Amino acid sequence: MSTEPQAARLPVSQPPLTPEFALRERYRQESQRIQRDFEAAGSGLASLSSRTRLVDSLCLTLWEQNFRATAGCALIALGGFGRSELFPHSDVDLLLLTEDEAHRDLIKTAVARLCQTMWDCGLRASPTTRTLADCGRFDQNNLEFTLSLLDCRLLAGDQALFARLHAKTVPQLIARESAGLLQQLSELTQTRRQRFGNTIFHLEPNVKDGPGGLRDCHVTQWIGMIVALASGRKPDLVSVCQNSVHGEMLTAVEFLSSCRCYLHYRHGRDDNTVTWAAQEEMAARGVATGSGPVSPAEWMRLYFRHAKAIDRNRSQLLAQVSQERSSLYRSFQRWRSRVSNNEFSVVDGRVYFQQAADAREAFVVLRLFTFIARHGFSLSPGAERRVNDAHVRLAETMPQDQYLWPHLRELLTQPHAADALRAMHSLNLLTRAIPEFETIDLLVLRDLYHRYTVDEHTFMAIDALHRLKLEKEAALQPFAELMSELEHPELLFLALLLHDTGKGLEGADHIHGSLQLATAAVQRMQLSQEDAATVCFLVANHLQISSTLRRRDIYDSATIRELAAKVGTPERLKMLTLLTLADIKAVNPEALTPWKAENLWRLYTRTAGYFDRSADSERLDADISTAAIEKIIAMLPAHRSGLLSFLDGLPQRYVLSHAPEEVAEHFLMASHLAAEPGSTGAPSGTPGCQPVQLSLRAVSGQQELTVVTADRAGLFRTIAGTLYAWGMDISKAAAFSNRAGVIVDVFCFKDRFRTLELNPPERERFKRSVREILMREAPLEPLLESRLKADHKPFKLTVETRLRFDEECSPRSTLLEVVTQDRPGLLHTISSALTEHDCSIEVALIDTEGPVAHDVFYITCGGKKLGPETMRAIEWALTAELADTLPCTW
Amino acid sequence: MTKLETVIQPAKFDAVKDALIEIGVEGMTVTEVRGHGRQKGHTEFYRGREYTVDLLPKVKIEMVLPDQIVDRAIQAITTAARTGKIGDGKIFLARIDEAIRIRNDDRGENAL
């Protein structure tokens, strides 16, 4: 605020037709000169300053012409005019301040004449007449006026009156109403930013009102002034910027001011939208670049960089104000909040380092971002400053290799991962950890479809998946369930993080570039071969489903068959479907319509159904080698013919759902069958003492038992029964057999009583028990009886049992699909019922999602499909066992 | 002037749009819709649950054309959208009395 009138009288050229005409003419000429200067030099701030001086002098001239007695009244500039930031077509906010009501009545006519002349000049004068007492009252419904007083500046008139306003009335008003003002200003800002989706990233941003725009900058200044006046300090601009970003803020304001100036001149009015055409012009002219013409995309990159600086400063200042307003007691209590730990503390939703020196340790900083990702807190200004100060050291020590992946994996799967990644990126640490991300830093895609920069699109896609469970849109709810079913969500999130990195590389095919970068990243982080393959598959195929939706008939079975062949496994289909959903949703707020979401879901369900229905019919042929088979053979080249014999007749699903290393291991197990006790040579399926090969390993917190042996009646039931008898809860299983009658059954199970985990010697005893029961050297029934006695409590059923037979999907088997409540011993119950009806399980696909068991069996009876009577009998038997309702047939 | 309202398979939209642009159609309004004609719907299963899909996804294209290119537009649409199966879609035609460009008050075919 300034107390001295600084304007010089506007020289009036001679001889004027009328004083008003001369004034208008002079204003017009001076305005044109300022515009020419701006077009030549491109400095927005210089132009604002010149315009302010010009309008100041105009006001002074008009004051002298129209106001005879100036005692008791003053002409004051408010708002942007008061800040000396008068843009070419901005409103000219004026306050006619009077001592009292009597003075107000006296100047009515003069005010009208002043405004009339200003309007005739082409200025949008916006006057208000108030008494000093009026200015000292806070009008809840007119926050804007009180805020504009913060920027008041004397133009002409009674200096003593202005001094009272400036030195006493306004400070007292602000000090008295600071809490309400800050609250209302915060709400007003929030409402304004919500109009722009609360993001700075817009295709055609608004340089004044949009997030990261000049209004945000004003808000930070006002907050700083209110806080300073409330605590009796003198406000200044520097105090409202973090010291570390003060220079950055000034540069940003210069850039945005030049941009807004250009827009005003270009549009001929107060239109602050950076349209596409304006972007191209400003880029070509090098407006505000400081380095001459640039490409439109590069100019927008500069724009977003400056908008980010303003946005971050606003956010940090609000945090600081919130912190200052907290009482010491409240701060102390929050400091000790429950989520605080020995590394980080939380105050008012902001995270601080417990030890300042920790900000220099890369792994502590990684844990800090994981902490943010888990709880959804923001980084405190102090913590941000410390990380910034330690940036050189952090940049040098930030892990990029196998030591990064455990941290990144944890971060990506936390509910606020996107916020943590944004915070990491804004501190230039994300690109230190994942250099591949550098290519898309603030990268603008100049098309009508993409709303956000590529890096922000990536964060929004990750956020879209994390927020699925909160979605109210009915069309999105099935996807939330799908998300909860993923075995390795971290791989999907990593694929999302890298899927568009290729857009920053030269060349038209961004998928190829993204794949190259993703491959480099997963190799550097030393992901397992299987995980790396999954991430690369997702990146390489991230447009596959979108393309199918756009170009193929999703109700055509050929479309589904081709998609299933490309995707390979149900798990990959789930991940690719979710990646597609997130990718579309993060393009712009309207991109994912319910129509698109429904079509995507239908494509998913049809393809998932195809995987279940085709497991028996699509089998491997020893005479037809595929790329997948050659990959397996490459691991054991000396066993080519043996491997081909082993694979002959196995469902294709088997090869697609197992890594080559696993298939090779199964083959070796099958090869060892001949050397096992009880072997009668090649597996022939003869009942009796058949050799068995077992493997037991811990996988992702569960146990996985693989059984390779000769097929025989009741085998699946026996394995399921043995596991149940040991107290194991089967979550997934798959049973396959080859043409020679060798079966490969894989069971994943939870160790309900942690028997194997807590007693390592029990692992061998467990394996021995399974082997003895399968080789009929020990009976299963006594073990089962003990377990059934222990599990005597009735199970509360919340999932309706559904059974479905399908005779069409396989040429030789009948498909039985069972959906029911999961419970201990369920698989044994179902397989026992099938065995009792003389059914043979050719293929089994067992899955559990939360409380729902989803089991698919391909069954034969006497080597043929099931007859109607057998189906009916099985339906009755299973319904009686699994539910308390009568059988239903769909 | 004639208004063409065309309902086609979503998978055929790109081909139809390209074919229309090829013959000089400059403007169209596109809507994602659901519906069925004689194709009706069908039943699907997922996780043992039955889903009746009675309204199938379609794309509706609306455009008003000068009479002299209507036949060519119809030819372009049918060629690009036809698979020969039920569900390929339909074209509806209606006479249009007047068109007005809001920006400059152009009338008739000049407004198209």
Image (tube, grey):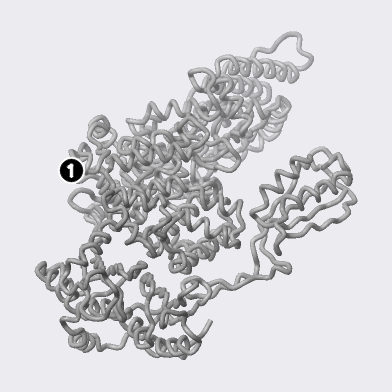
Q: Residues within 10 Å of mark 1 (few under 14, many from 20)?
A: few
- For mark 1, what is the residue? A355
Vertical side of A43 occupied by A601: above or below: below
Residue A33 location in percent, x, y? Answer: 64, 15
Residue A303 location in percent, x, y? Answer: 50, 31
Vertical side of A828 occupied by A417: above or below: above
Q: Is residue B107 left or right of residue A33?
A: right
Q: Is residue A172 left or right of residue A383?
A: right
Residue B110 location in percent, x, y? Answer: 86, 39
Amino acid at dot 1: Gln
Q: Front-most of A73 and A412?
A: A412
Q: Is residue A872 left or right of residue A650?
A: right
Q: Chain of mark 1?
A: A
Residue at 81%, 58% (x, y): give it.
Answer: B92
Q: Front-most of A737 and B16?
A: A737
The answer to whether one can see residue A138 in this image is no
Q: Front-most of A824 and A281?
A: A824
Q: Front-most of B93 and A742?
A: A742
Residue at 58%, 14% (x, y): give it.
Answer: A40
When asked about the image quadrant of residue A286, the answer is top right
Vertical side of A639 occupied by A106: above or below: above
Disc 1 element = loop
When asked about the image quadrant of residue A65, the answer is top right
When asked about the image quadrant of residue B8, the answer is bottom right
Vertical side of B89 occupied by A810: above or below: below
Q: Residue furthest front?
A: A681
Q: Residue furthest left?
A: A761
Residue A276 location in percent, x, y? Answer: 61, 33
Count of numbered marks: 1
Residue at 49%, 65% (x, y): give it.
Answer: A610
The answer to whether one can see residue A840 in this image is yes
